[in-house]
Amino acid sequence: RKEVEQDPGPFNVPEGATVAFNCTYSNSASQSFFWYRQDCRKEPKLLMSVYSSGNEDGRFTAQLNRASQYISLLIRDSKLSDSATYLCAVSYSGAGSYQLTFGKGTKLSVIP
Amino acid sequence: GAVVSQHPSWVICKSGTSVKIECRSLDFQATTMFWYRQFPKQSLMLMATSNEGSKATYEQGVEKDKFLINHASLTLSTLTVTSAHPEDSSFYICSASDTGPQHFGDGTRLSIL
């Protein structure tokens, strides 16, 4: 079983739609969780950290379920500019210094 | 804040050439720098973790003599791909961290002919 797994998609959604991605992780000692956004042929950019209580940033909501070992990202009112690949990343202190393990990413295409 | 600069952005060179990639944290001191490689439609794969002033820790399967990492200061790390071959062609990305999340450089697209 891979350490961090995501549905690769693509998710093709119309503008204004709500879309949700899940990401599962295998290491129960994982401590920190993040969602990154990666545009084609670009570096990943931190979208948001994921906290145990769940957190929201504008149209984006992230949640963590430790019992089931998954994190989720919800995007409301999708914009064309949201089209990108969304990577989840997980770290645990045993790896040292916020060493991250990334999923392969979920591709989102928002269609006019 | 938290800007990481990576240079060069794009390299095309002949097989057997050694290529050096620089990663700089511009507005913070990076305790740790990370080097990743990403093949098309694949996830970012960590190659090595580098702490300033000490030897890099390489992930399993990454040849340390092939991928030389130097982290001489808190703001600069370099990755040298020695005697590069076509199978080394990939997108190489560095990231830097003080004690918080990693911040990524722009990446270097390496093409070996």
Image: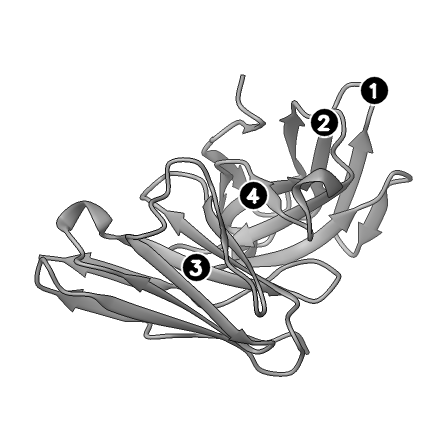
**Distance from Cα at disc 4 to Cα at disc 3:** 15 Å
In what element is the residue under mark 2?
strand
Mark 4 is surrounded, within 10 Å at the Cα level, by few (under 14), some (14 to 19) or many (20 or more) other residues, namely: many
Question: Which residue is located at x 66 percent, y 67 percent?
Answer: B31
Amino acid on which the number 3 mark rests in the picture: Ile
- In which quadrant of the rendered view does residue B80 lie? bottom left
**Distance from Cα at disc 1 to Cα at disc 3:** 33 Å
Amino acid on which the number 2 mark rests in the picture: Tyr
Q: Do the residues labelled 1 and 3 touch (CB within 8 Å)?
A: no
The residue labelled by disc 2 is A70
The residue labelled by disc 3 is B93
Mark 1 is surrounded, within 10 Å at the Cα level, by few (under 14), some (14 to 19) or many (20 or more) other residues, namely: few
Give the chain letter at badge 3.
B
Residue B77 lies, with reference to residue A44, above or below; the image says below
The residue labelled by disc 4 is A87
Amino acid on which the number 4 mark rests in the picture: Leu
Which of the pair A43/B8 is nearer the observer?
B8
Mark 2 is surrounded, within 10 Å at the Cα level, by few (under 14), some (14 to 19) or many (20 or more) other residues, namely: some
Specify which label sits upstream in the sequence, 1 or 4. 1
Q: Where is residue B20 in the image (x, y as percent from the top left)?
A: 30, 70
